[in-house]
Image (cartoon, helix red, strand yellow):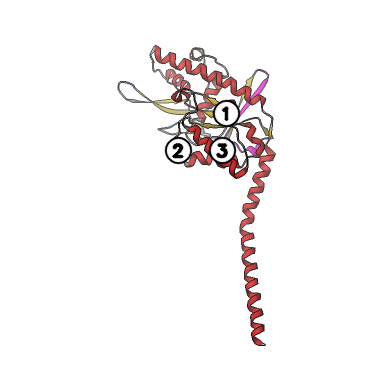
Amino acid sequence: MMSETGAGKSTFINAFANYVIYSTLSEVTRGDMQVLIPSTFHMIGPETFHARRISIEQPTTDEKCEETGQSSTQYCRSYNFRIGNCQLRLIDAPGIGDYDHLNGICTVLEPNNERLTVGFCFCFKEILTHLHINAKDNLMFVFNNGWSTFYWPGSTTPLVRSITKGLHKTWGVEIPFNNENTFMFDNEAFRFLATCKNGVEFSDEEVTNFSKSWEISVKEFTRLIQRIHKCELHAVRDSVSINSTQQLIRKLTRPMGETARLIEENIQLAKQHKQNILNMH
């Protein structure tokens, strides 16, 4: 799983842990909420506009909870889930060389980005250029905050298409971006749940809306798992080989440039020496 900072990846992983166990929001409300990553956010009272700090678990050395934001992952971590007869491992910001293969590569995005930020481009474009061409079939687009765009990709869609088009033009790689590898979640239902656990009450209408959001996210979770299960294994060694080659090329750039400069200097000295000899005669 990869994303730019603040895209909601930690919230997605926390919500994911609950989707595995609970099909409805009422079930998790009566049960124990699963929290894998400590997080902090603020809830604004609708009448008083007073900001209330909501904390989920205590931060560890792996996570940094800012005063005004969500958890920020400090180190690479993986999370294991048992789903039927299968074991699913989510790898958060990994060093992919530590693994033999990957089933899916999920890039987490906001659905309503209006422009290509530096962080967006780096996370999406630069990382993809370091993957082997075969990884394109394992790539999936996970959108958070789907409620804000009626569970459609929203204005981020043309930005993604612009980047994939550029990669196709530069590298000749056709990256699929369609309904089959795109998934819409609204993990605000998890934050709603965390807020309830902190003693905040909501109206029946609000509970109904978040319950519907939870059900849609669980359906998308099921569809995501089915997609991952269908994907062929992507051999990480292929991407590692590309990275090693790219690093070698970058390292060779300076000595090659220095060699070219010395060759040119020698050519000029040889021409000057030849001219001196001719002038002597």
Question: On the image, numbered disc 2 is attached to which residue?
Answer: 115
Residue name at image x 63 percent, y 42 percent: 172
The residue positioned 51% from the left and 16% from the top of the image is: 215
Q: Which residue is mark 1?
A: 178
Neighbor class of circle 3 (other Cα within 10 Å; few <14, some 14-19, many 20+) is many
Question: Which of 58 and 240 lies nearest the eye of the viewer?
Answer: 240
Viewer-proximal residue among 3 and 17: 3
> How far across and down, in percent of the image, does residue 241 sit?
68, 44
> Are dots 3 and 2 in contact, CB under 8 Å?
no
Taking the magenta stretch, the answer to whether it contains residue 90 is yes
Q: Position of residue 64 (x, y in %)?
A: 48, 34
Name the kind of residue labelled 1 in the image: Asn
- Tell whether position 34 is magenta: no
Q: Give the SS element for disc 3.
A: helix
Nearer-N-terminus badge (3/2):
2
Query: Label 3 sits on what residue type?
Result: Thr
**Direction from residue 219 to residue 101 in the image, left or right:** right
Q: Position of residue 203 (x, y in %)?
A: 38, 13
Residue sitting at x 48%, y 15%: 212
Residue with the most extreme left position: 48
Q: Are marks 2 and 1 in contact (CB under 8 Å)?
A: no
Q: Secondary structure at mark 1?
A: loop
| Whole-number angstrom distance, CA of label 2 to CA of label 1 | 20 Å
- Quadrant occupied by the N terminus: top right
The stretch of residues the image draws in magenta is 84-99
| Numbered mark located on residue 164 in the image | 3
Q: Relative to residue 7, is residue 193 depicted above or below?
A: above
